[in-house]
């Protein structure tokens, strides 16, 4: 029993069963067909109005009560990751090479359980339950918006919730301003001239240029970004050559950038391009650079963040302050379109506690009732019936 919200034990038991089933059928970005069909079937059974097909597999279920005043959107992500699960679970992934390593199965189960209770909640307005595909790298939120999500199904505010294994169960974070970073990916191809490894003077070695480049890129954050700002530039891949005795024609360097402010993002990209071009040229090589900005920073609206914290506290959660994360989230696109707030709910497990994106990760089922309580309390507080 939370403040005004009773979560029946059978609802939580059902949510756990849903979560385990969804965990067993992970589907990658824009391939969430079985997941989408399962969610749509459940939502229809709750008597909600359902829209399907946004971004291919996305679903929006709506319910209106009272005088149809304010409208809020509540979002859960649907997709899995291309990771082979190694956890020994009765409900482990049945699809080799794919698993719910980020807890999206838990996010769906919590929001689905809240939807199952919504008809019994007194409120004045409209709730839209948004099940979004392709959060992991592929921008499903952006595609839903481009396909008319908020034109066809407008909302006054939108809220997202993500489990956070670094925090104890019951902890809740939804501060104003930045909570997740913007991110980019980059590919740098350095072209030289191949040669026999025993005769390096007859070639132009792209590996030497690439090694110099990787070292030089470490100066971008330390020397080109204000120390009062925050940014990350990480090289995560180097590919070159196939033989012990052959200097290859080219080398490829890949990685990611993260930032919060537009100034930091612009400086990071500009310096990446300049350093790659000039170091390649200094080694008589040519650099081809692809830098792609994927997600903007996730920036919480101050009023919506306060609403989220208020609802969480009344649902019995422990609202705390925490620094933003340099990880990224495509809910940022929704927050660019309408005001809203993205929140973390603590999901740490006792003992072994694998982090997000680990092949051993499994959502903490103890968090399910807390997430359901938050969603239902948010509906009540955001769409409160006015006193007569």
Image: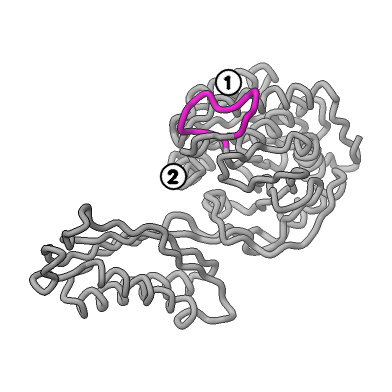
Instruction: Residue 138: give its label.
Output: 2
In screen coordinates, is 77 left or right of 365?
A: left
Magenta-drawn segment: 87-100
Query: Is residue 99 located in the magenta-colored stretch of the structure?
Result: yes
| Label 2 residue SS | loop
Q: How far across and how far down the image is residue 193, in percent?
A: 12, 66
Q: Does residue 168 sit above or below 147 in this rendering?
A: below
Looking at the image, which is closer to me, 282 or 21? 282
Residue 355 location (% of width, % of height): 63, 48
Q: Is residue 189 above or below residue 313?
A: below
Residue at 54% across, 67% down: 260
Q: How is the image coloured?
A: one colour
Q: Is residue 292 visible?
A: no
Q: Residues within 10 Å of mark 2 (few under 14, many from 20)?
A: some
- Disc 1 element: helix
Q: Residues within 10 Å of mark 1 (few under 14, many from 20)?
A: some
Disc ID at residue 80: none
Q: Which residue is mark 1?
A: 38
């Amino acid at each position: 029993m939370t403040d005004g919200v009773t979560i029946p034990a059978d609802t939580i038991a059902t949510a756990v069963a849903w979560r385990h089933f969804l965990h067993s059928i992970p589907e990658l970005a824009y391939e969430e067909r079985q997941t989408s069909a399962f969610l749509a079937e459940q939502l229809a059974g709750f008597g909600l109005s359902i829209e399907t097909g946004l971004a291919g597999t996305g679903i929006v279920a709506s319910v209106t009560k009272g005088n149809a005043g304010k409208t809020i959107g509540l979002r859960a992500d649907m997709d899995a990751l291309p990771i082979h699960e190694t956890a020994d679970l009765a409900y482990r992934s049945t699809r080799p090479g794919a698993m719910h390593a980020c807890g999206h199965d838990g996010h769906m189960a919590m929001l689905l359980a809240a939807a199952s209770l919504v008809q019994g909640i007194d409120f004045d307005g409209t709730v839209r339950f948004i099940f979004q595909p392709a959060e992991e790298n592929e921008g499903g939120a952006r595609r839903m918006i481009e396909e008319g999500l908020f034109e066809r199904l407008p909302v006054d505010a939108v809220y997202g919730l993500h489990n956070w294994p670094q925090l104890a169960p019951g902890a809740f974070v939804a501060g104003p301003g930045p909570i997740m970073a913007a991110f980019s990916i980059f590919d740098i191809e350095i072209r030289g001239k191949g040669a026999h490894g025993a005769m390096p003077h007859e070639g132009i070695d792209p590996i030497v240029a690439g090694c110099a480049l990787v070292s030089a890129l470490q100066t971008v954050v330390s020397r080109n970004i204000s120390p009062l700002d925050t940014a990350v530039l990480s090289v995560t891949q180097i590919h070159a050559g196939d033989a012990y005795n052959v200097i290859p024609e080219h080398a490829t360097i890949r990685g990611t950038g993260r930032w919060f402010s537009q100034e930091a993002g612009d400086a990071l990209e500009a310096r990446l391009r300049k350093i790659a071009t000039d170091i390649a040229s200094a080694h008589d090589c040519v650099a081809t650079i692809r830098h792609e900005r994927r997600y903007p920073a996730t920036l919480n609206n101050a009023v919506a963040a306060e609403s989220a914290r208020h609802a969480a506290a009344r649902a019995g959660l422990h609202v705390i302050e925490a620094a933003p994360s340099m990880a990224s989230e495509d809910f940022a696109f929704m927050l660019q379109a309408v005001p809203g707030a993205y929140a973390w709910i603590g999901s740490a497990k006792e003992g072994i506690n694998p982090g997000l994106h680990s092949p051993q990760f499994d959502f903490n089922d103890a968090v399910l009732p807390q997430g359901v309580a938050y969603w239902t309390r948010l509906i009540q507080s955001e769409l409160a019936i006015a006193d007569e």
